[in-house]
Image (cartoon, grey):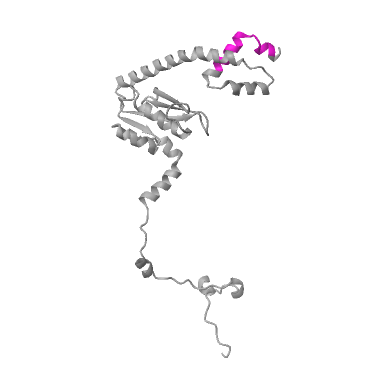
């Protein structure tokens, strides 16, 4: 079979391909570029976005039902003390979207928020995470949790405390950035006080003995320390 026969009017195959793209959040343009490298035809753009418009509302309802069940399950167990939040961007740099999820004690997702650069208040990529977090704080299912576990971002800690919730550091992010945290902790907790001019004047200057090359002195004699052997003795006068 040729690639045209495989991707031409094959409704079943095109549907499966579109299902895989949408369920894995792969853009049609990226997949089309992949197919062109393999000399294969990609599903049409019209079919892709039509399929996406049909299945996304259904999946969103299923996800909402699953998160509500997870929330009720944790509340019934008494595990409503804390949730853990973290954000993920659509790309490493200059991201156009950001998604933040809230995980309960059993690691199940109980709430999710997604923000785009086209949303009101979004001016740059780094500002998408705070927007997601502010929306997550107002979420109905998040209001009942007393502690929020996060990565320690200053932009997120203050609004959390102002909302009456406790903040707890995320140990995964701490070990991930252990060197940066260690440097900051040393600067903050182990900072030495600056010496005054008087303290500097009272310091006793220690003069180190001037040494000469070992080649000039030769081998160290037996019973003599090496440091004593290389010390420069006062030069004798020529008259002596």
Q: Let me know if residue 7 is in the magenta part.
A: yes
Q: Let me know if residue 239 is in the magenta part.
A: no
Compared to residue 228, the image places residue 96 above or below, namely above
Compared to residue 98, the image places residue 2 above or below, namely above
Which is the main secondary structure of the residues drawn in magenta? helix
Considering the image in quadrants, where does the N terminus appear? top right
Residue 99 x/y as whole percent = 45, 27
Q: Residue at x 30, y 31 (%)?
A: 163
Residue 44 x/y as whole percent = 61, 15
Give left or right: position of 131 versus 166.
right
Q: Residue at x 46, y 32 (%)?
A: 123
Range drawn in magenta: 4-20
Give left or right: position of 155 versus 211.
left
Q: State the count of labels.
A: 0
Q: Quadrant of residue 121?
A: top left
Q: Quadrant of residue 104?
A: top left
Residue 36 x/y as whole percent = 67, 22
Give left or right: position of 38 versus 231.
right
Closer to the camera in the image, 169 or 232: 169
Residue 231 x/y as whole percent = 52, 75
Considering the image in quadrants, where does the C terminus appear? bottom right
Q: Quadrant of residue 63?
A: top left
Give left or right: position of 222 versus 175.
right
Closer to the camera in the image, 9 or 94: 94
Compared to residue 31, the image places residue 8 above or below, namely above
Closer to the camera in the image, 139 or 45: 45
């Amino acid at each position: 079979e040729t690639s045209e026969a495989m991707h031409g009017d094959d409704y079943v195959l095109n549907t499966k391909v579109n299902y895989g793209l949408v369920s894995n959040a792969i853009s049609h343009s990226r997949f089309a570029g992949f197919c062109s490298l393999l000399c294969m035809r990609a599903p049409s753009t019209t079919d892709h976005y039509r399929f996406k418009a049909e299945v996304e509302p259904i999946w969103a309802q299923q996800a909402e039902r699953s998160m509500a069940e997870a929330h009720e399950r944790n509340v019934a167990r008494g595990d409503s003390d804390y949730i853990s939040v973290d954000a993920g961007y659509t790309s490493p740099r200059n991201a156009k979207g950001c998604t933040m999820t809230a995980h309960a004690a059993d690691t199940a997702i109980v709430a999710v928020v997604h923000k785009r650069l086209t949303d009101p208040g979004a001016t740059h990529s780094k500002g998408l995470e705070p927007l997601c977090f502010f929306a997550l704080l107002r979420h109905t299912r998040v209001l009942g949790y007393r502690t929020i576990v996060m990565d320690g971002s200053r932009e997120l800690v203050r609004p959390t405390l102002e909302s009456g919730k406790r903040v707890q550091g995320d140990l995964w992010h701490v070990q991930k950035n252990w060197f940066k945290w260690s440097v900051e902790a040393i600067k903050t907790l182990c900072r030495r006080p600056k010496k005054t001019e008087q303290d500097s004047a009272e310091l006793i200057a220690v003069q180190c003995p001037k040494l000469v090359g070992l080649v000039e002195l030769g081998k160290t004699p037996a019973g003599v320390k090496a440091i004593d052997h290389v010390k420069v003795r006062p030069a004798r006068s020529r008259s002596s």
